[in-house]
Amino acid sequence: MKLGICVLEGPYQHEASDTAYNFAVAALEKGHEIFRIFFYHDGVNNATRLMVPPQDDRHIQQRWSELAEKHDLDLVVCVAAAQRRGILDEDEMKRHGKDANNIAPGFRISGLGQLIEAEIECDRVVFFGD
Amino acid sequence: MSEVKNFLYVNRKAPHGTIYALESLEVVLIGAAFEQDVALAFLDDGVFQLVKGWDTSELGVKNFQPAYTALGDYDISKVYVERESLEERGLTEDDLIEMTYEDEDDDWAEKSSIRIVSREEMAQIMRDSDVILSF
């Protein structure tokens, strides 16, 4: 099955991004295709490379980045939601005159159209959130 | 992307207190450009999004309620509101804002987009949708 995943909650605060990650791993193991993983609402905070969780805890951003690299996944962060919450890539940093960016490897910032496109292209898009 | 799917945006949360309602609306507005068959559903506390007379001045947040009334301009003509959710909150259809669209099959007559449906009907609407975006 061609799947999309939408992550609506931030890391650590809420289990939704853990569940989404576990779902993605399980789906890939079963041989399903993941067309795209879209991060929206506070879900965009999964994409900051500046998170530093305790060493004995899971590293949610790194885990996404590694999964993306291993399976060539498309991790997309909504630009409007990201701007509100201070998630920037180099282009956005320059555009808004900021002095830093924080997007993690494997993530890219794009528009909500990427979510709609996933809905059109996929057999199912599974939402993780409240 | 020539395929047209039935999109249902499900709004279940109050308009204020969290950003879910506002960011859901942003998806609807962007999604309108993709020429899909779009419907909106309001249930649970989501029905408060359509209660008229918002005053956000003391909340210090933007009043984005006018965007709902503009949805007709985005070819969105199906807005389902769950009757039980209204009743559970002491609300009736009279408490809701007006949402209208122009019916191209009826000489562009202005009609109400809001359809009050039962919980059972809402379940059927969800079953009949290809895509459900739940916020």
Image: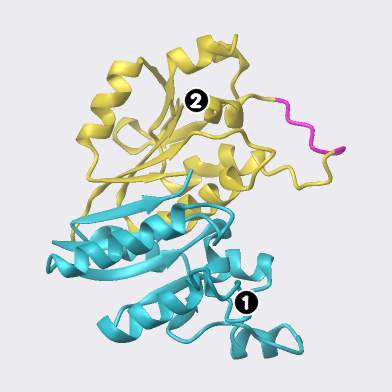
User: How far is the residue under mark 1 from the one under mark 2?
Assistant: 37 Å
Would residue A41 be found to the left or right of residue A83 on screen?
left
Label 1 Cα crowd, 10 Å radius (few <14 / some 14-19 / many 20+): few
Seen in the picture, residue A93 relative to A76 is either above or below; the reply is below
Query: Camera-side residue: A128 or A4?
Result: A128
Seen in the picture, residue A19 relative to B61 is either above or below; the reply is below
Would residue B57 be found to the left or right of residue A55 on screen?
right
Q: Which residue is the site of mark 1? A: A52
Q: Which residue is the site of mark 2? A: B44
Residue B100 marker: none
Q: Chain drawn yellow, letter?
A: B
Seen in the picture, residue A117 relative to B35 is either above or below; the reply is below
Q: Quadrant of residue A123?
A: bottom left
How far across and down, in percent of the image, does residue A116 sit?
Answer: 36, 60
Q: Which residues are magenta?
A: B53-58
- Residue B2 visible in the shown view: no
Would residue B75 be found to the left or right of residue A120 on screen?
right
The residue under label 1 is which amino acid type? Val
